[in-house]
Every structure is written in structure tokens, then in C-alpha cells.
Image (cartoon, grey):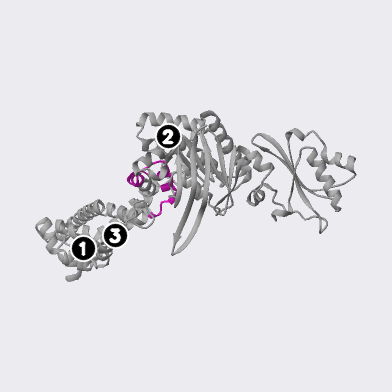
């Protein structure tokens, strides 16, 4: 599959009043055609800067960003504008023109390219149909809810027939239910139109729900990159663990208690592991937290358990889980 | 009030209207682009250009700081050059326009400044050129604010037009000055002042209504 974006050793440094701040440090990654690629990190980690280098809203200080093999930095203003027609973007704040109707907003991206009025109208209606807002075509954005505004922004982005859609915290201003609906819509568009989507977010749930691969950005560094399933079940960097592990505090009942995270996927869900553990070894574990979620369409469960106090008992429990195909990792290390 | 004065007042209303209308029109024809340039060349904007911004900004500030009465007198030779005479309604339009241009420019600049940066970023990400972004995103988005500013500007020009009476410009201001002030005819003074107030209120009301009609937030 072709690479849509290829970033090589990208650095971005801001200079402000003589002070330097490096927002991106040596980022190299590729985004493949047709995938939904997540970029996740805490606020201030540099992910918004990173996505803005993909359409050169931000210039890189060094390194290169290639779009279908073309170095964006080498483009003249007019060429850059042409490339931007194939890289649409949606935003956390929607950024619709409030003084224009919904359909006029959708037409904007086509008007820039110079598509004639009649075709523009027709296509805009078609796009509003896809996002399910055809009946609102003559409303003004102020009359719409947040989720509806983002749908209009998506229609506007798609109307230009882009090759890529960049989403900058596109669901962060929306409640969980509406977020789910918008993500379903993006997934549908990805599948039906083979559109490559890049999603910037600080919420792991967004990545788990629709992304194929994910890059974790921590303090301007690329901390980890890989298939979402891999990163979820076996996070290796500190930043990844912080994002993947449940956020509630785990206080072991015993001061010297040891806590582990146990991950199982759908294939082991018909086995009662905890009951079997007690039956076979006579050892008990204390469940501190447990949940299940769908990661890329596959059901995953995770449990945070406190192990028994004795060292060899702990080993027995861990071995028992591992033999059953579960992934066991220590939790204490990331705190 | 004599028939003669009554006629003079009616004529004065018309002259004031003509002066205000044309001076406002011309000051927008020149001041609006200047405001757009001031906005777009300032720091962090689409066409950031320190030199251009500094030069235009300085000229605008100097013109704006001059008391209008002084500007009126200073511009007499220029007015004569442009319209061939330095007294009368037509002549007054010249200093009124010059005096209003910097006010219009700053007012337009401040209206455009209200547009959320996100909308400009969206336009840029769609591949819009800076000029396209200004014409099709920034100006439409700030239209209600521009209209409201417009009403304030027209009312200011109207107020200035009364001052033009001092150097022989026509209009209600001249009548108020000649009959009301120099001859101390209180009824003429109050009639003209009342008419001026009504005209300002009308302009303000029309401006607010237009802005409201346009405001979709």
C-alpha cells in the first residue's frame, strides 16, 4: 500500500522572546493509504503541531514531510494550495462561517477550487445527505448543536474530494454519545470512500474505537507507534501505559502488595480464569478494577489485580495466567 | 421664524444629507481597503508586513490625531485643487472624506480583528489564497460588525459636517452657526440642533437594524 505521508526526522522549534521551545523532536513515521491513523498524547505534547505539519499550516524547522512522495517544503505557494485541496481538515471548534448558511459553508471548499455554482449546490446536497443534515441546508450554524456543526464541517471537508482527512481533536468538544456517532460516521466514510484519516486526540477511547494504527506523542517525542491492538494489549512506553491503563488509583490492601494488569482478548473470554485459579492453585487474587472494551472491533478485557503476598505464590499466579495466553504486566512501574 | 430661514433650514437638511452621504461613501471607498491592509499586514496575520503596516498605521494615526477643525483649514488648498473651490457643500466633502478615512480604516481593522482565527485556519487548510480568505471568509464573517461600525462612522461624518460650516461649507451646521450663534436666534439654533440629533438617531437606528438582520449568531 502506498504511503500518503512520510515524515523524516521532523523537528519543530518555536522562538519566542529569545526563548526556544521544541514542540517536535525527531519524529519519523509513515501513514498508509486507506488507514485510520491515530495520534494521541496529553495536551501540550505536540500532537496539534504535528498534524499541522501534514498540510504545512506549520513549517518544520528541520526534517521533511512528504505527501505522496512530494516534499511539502519544496512547494511554491500556488502548488501548496493545490495540494491542500486534497488534504481536508476538521477542527475541535468546527470553524464554520457563522454568517453563511449550512449549504453555503459546505460549498466553500468547492468554490475555492472553482467548481461552478450549479454543480456545487448539487454536490453540497449530496454531502449533506451523507452526514444526515439535508433538512438543515438553509439554517445558520448558530442554530445547530455541536455534533451537527461537526457534521457540516465533515461535509465541507469531503466536498472537495480529498485524499486525506485530518481531524484535530474533532470530537473533544462533544459528549460521549455524539462522539460515538461522529466516529461511526468517520469510519463509514473511511470504508466507503477509501479515505485516509488522521485523528488527533487525547482520548484513548477514540483511538480504540476506530483507529488501525496509533502513534503516541509524549513531550514532542514519538514514544510508541504500532497497531492499536498491540499497543493496547502490550504498551511498552511509559506514555503508552499511562494512556492505556485505567486511570483510577490502585491502592493495594497490603503496603507491600503487588499489582498487575491482565489483558485478555475475545478468544479467552469463555474461560473463567479467576475461578480456575482458585480451584487449581488455592491462591486468591483481589480484583481492583476490571472492564471490557472493543479495540478495532475485537473485544478486549483488562483486569487490575492484587497478587498474594508471598513471592512464590505471586509467581504461580502470573505463570498460571501466562500459560492461559493472557498478557500480564506490572502496574507499579509506571506510577 | 421667517419664511426665509425656514427655507434655509430645509435646504440645510438636504446639504447636510448630501455632504454626509458622499463623504461617507468616498471615505469607505478609500478607508475600507486601508483597514483591510492594516488588518492583514499586522503581526501574525495572513499578509504580515511590518513596513507597510507601520507606514499606513502612522499616516492614519497622524490624520486621526489632528483636530477636525485644523484639518479643515489645512486642507483648503488641497480642496481648491480637487474641486476648484474651497467653500460650499461640494468643497466640504473633501475635508470630510479625508477626516473620515482614518476613522473608517481603524474601525474596519477592529471589526476584522474580531473574526476567530480558526475560520482563517480552516480557509487556509482548504487551499484558499490570502486574498480569497479575506474576501470570502473574513469580510463576510465580520459583516454585522462592519455595518455597526458603518453607522458610527456615518454619524461621526454628520457631526463633522456641522463643523464644516465654519469654513463656509453649507448644511445645518452653517445655519446653526450663522443664525443661531452669531445672531443669537435661539429658535434657529435649537431647531437645527434637534434636526441634527434626529438625523444621527436615524442613521444609528438604520445601522443597528441592518447589522441585526445580518447577525446570525
B121 inside magenta stretch: yes
| Place of residue A82 in the rendered image (x, y in percent of width and height, measured from the top left) | 38, 38
Res A125 → quadrant: top left
Q: Nearer the viewer, residue B107 or A108?
A: A108
Q: Which range of residues does the magenta coloring cover?
A: B113-136
Q: CA distance from mark 3 to mark 2?
A: 37 Å
Whether residue B195 can be seen here: no
Whether residue A110 can be seen here: yes
Q: Which mark is residue B51?
A: 3
Q: Is B80 left or right of A211, judged from the image as shown?
A: left
For disc 3, the chain is B
Report helix, strand or loop for mark 3.
helix
| Place of residue B207 in the rendered image (x, y in percent of width and height, measured from the top left) | 34, 51
Count residues near mark 1 (Cα–Cα under 10 Å), then give few for <14, some for 14-19, many for 20+: many
Q: Are marks 3 and 2 in contact (CB under 8 Å)?
A: no
Residue B96 lies, with reference to residue A313, above or below; the image says below
Res B91 → quadrant: bottom left
Q: CA distance from mark 1 to mark 2?
A: 57 Å
Determine the residue positioned at 52% across, 50% down.
Answer: A26
Q: Main secondary structure of the magenta part?
A: helix
Q: Nearer the viewer, mark 1 or mark 2?
A: 2
Determine the residue positioned at 83% across, 45% down.
Answer: A317
Q: Nearer the viewer, residue A234 or B123?
A: A234
In the picture of the structure, the residue carrying the numbered disc 1 is B173
For disc 1, the chain is B
Marks 1 and 3, the one that precedes in the sequence? 3
Amino acid at each position: 500500500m502506498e504511503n500518503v505521508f512520510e515524515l523524516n526526522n521532523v523537528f519543530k522549534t518555536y522562538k519566542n522572546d529569545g526563548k526556544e521551545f521544541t514542540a517536535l523532536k525527531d519524529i519519523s513515521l509513515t501513514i498508509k493509504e486507506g488507514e485510520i491513523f491515530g495520534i494521541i498524547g496529553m495536551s501540550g505534547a505536540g500532537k496539534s503541531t504535528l498534524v499541522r505539519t501534514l498540510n504545512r499550516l506549520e513549517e518544520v524547522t528541520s526534517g521533511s514531510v512528504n505527501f505522496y512522495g512530494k516534499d511539502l517544503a519544496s512547494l511554491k505557494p500556488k502548488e501548496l494550495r493545490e495540494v491542500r485541496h486534497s488534504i481536508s481538515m476538521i477542527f475541535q471548534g468546527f470553524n464554520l462561517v457563522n454568517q453563511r448558511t449550512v449549504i453555503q459553508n459546505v460549498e466553500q471548499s468547492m468554490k475555492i477550487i472553482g467548481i461552478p455554482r450549479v454543480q456545487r449546490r448539487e454536490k453540497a446536497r449530496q454531502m449533506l445527505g451523507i452526514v444526515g443534515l439535508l433538512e438543515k441546508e438553509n439554517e445558520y450554524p448558530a442554530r445547530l448543536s455541536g455534533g451537527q456543526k461537526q457534521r457540516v464541517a465533515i461535509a465541507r471537508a469531503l466536498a472537495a474530494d480529498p485524499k486525506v482527512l485530518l481531524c484535530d481533536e474533532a470530537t473533544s468538544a462533544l459528549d460521549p454519545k455524539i462522539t460515538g456517532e461522529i466516529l461511526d460516521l468517520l469510519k463509514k466514510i473511511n470504508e466507503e470512500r477509501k479515505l485516509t484519516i488522521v485523528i488527533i486526540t487525547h482520548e484513548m477511547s477514540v483511538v480504540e474505537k476506530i483507529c488501525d494504527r496509533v502513534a503516541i506523542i509524549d513531550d514532542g517525542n514519538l514514544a510508541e507507534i504500532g497497531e492499536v491492538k498491540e499497543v493496547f494489549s502490550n504498551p511498552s512506553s511509559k506514555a503508552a501505559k499511562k494512556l492505556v491503563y485505567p486511570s483510577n488509583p490502585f491502592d493495594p490492601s497490603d503496603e507491600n502488595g503487588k499489582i498487575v494488569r491482565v489483558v485478555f482478548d475475545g478468544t479467552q473470554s469463555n474461560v473463567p480464569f479467576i475461578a480456575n485459579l482458585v480451584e487449581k492453585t488455592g491462591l486468591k487474587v483481589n480484583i481492583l478494577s476490571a472492564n471490557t472494551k472493543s479495540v478495532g472491533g475485537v473485544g478486549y478485557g483488562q483486569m487490575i489485580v492484587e497478587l498474594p503476598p508471598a513471592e512464590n505464590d505471586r509467581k504461580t499466579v502470573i505463570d498460571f495466567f501466562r500459560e492461559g495466553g493472557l498478557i500480564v504486566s506490572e502496574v507499579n512501574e509506571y506510577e | 421664524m421667517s419664511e426665509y430661514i425656514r427655507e434655509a433650514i430645509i435646504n440645510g437638511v438636504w446639504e447636510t444629507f448630501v455632504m454626509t452621504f458622499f463623504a461617507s461613501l468616498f471615505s469607505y471607498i478609500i478607508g475600507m481597503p486601508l483597514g483591510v491592509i492594516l488588518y492583514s499586514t499586522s503581526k501574525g496575520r495572513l499578509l504580515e508586513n511590518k513596513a507597510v503596516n507601520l507606514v499606513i498605521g502612522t499616516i492614519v494615526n497622524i490624520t486621526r490625531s489632528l483636530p477636525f477643525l485644523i484639518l479643515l483649514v489645512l486642507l483648503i488648498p488641497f480642496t481648491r485643487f480637487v474641486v476648484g473651490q474651497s467653500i460650499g457643500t461640494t468643497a466640504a466633502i473633501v475635508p470630510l472624506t479625508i477626516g473620515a478615512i482614518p476613522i473608517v480604516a481603524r474601525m474596519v481593522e477592529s471589526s476584522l480583528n474580531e473574526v476567530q482565527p480558526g475560520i482563517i485556519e480552516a480557509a487556509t487548510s482548504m487551499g484558499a489564497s490570502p486574498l480569497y480568505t479575506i474576501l470570502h471568509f473574513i469580510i463576510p464573517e465580520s459583516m454585522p460588525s462592519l455595518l455597526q461600525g458603518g453607522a458610527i462612522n456615518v454619524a461621526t461624518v454628520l457631526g463633522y459636517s456641522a463643523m464644516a460650516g465654519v469654513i463656509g461649507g453649507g448644511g445645518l451646521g452653517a445655519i446653526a452657526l450663522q443664525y443661531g450663534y452669531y445672531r443669537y436666534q435661539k429658535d434657529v439654533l435649537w431647531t437645527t440642533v434637534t434636526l441634527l440629533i434626529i438625523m444621527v438617531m436615524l442613521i444609528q437606528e438604520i445601522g443597528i437594524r441592518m447589522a441585526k438582520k445580518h447577525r446570525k449568531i
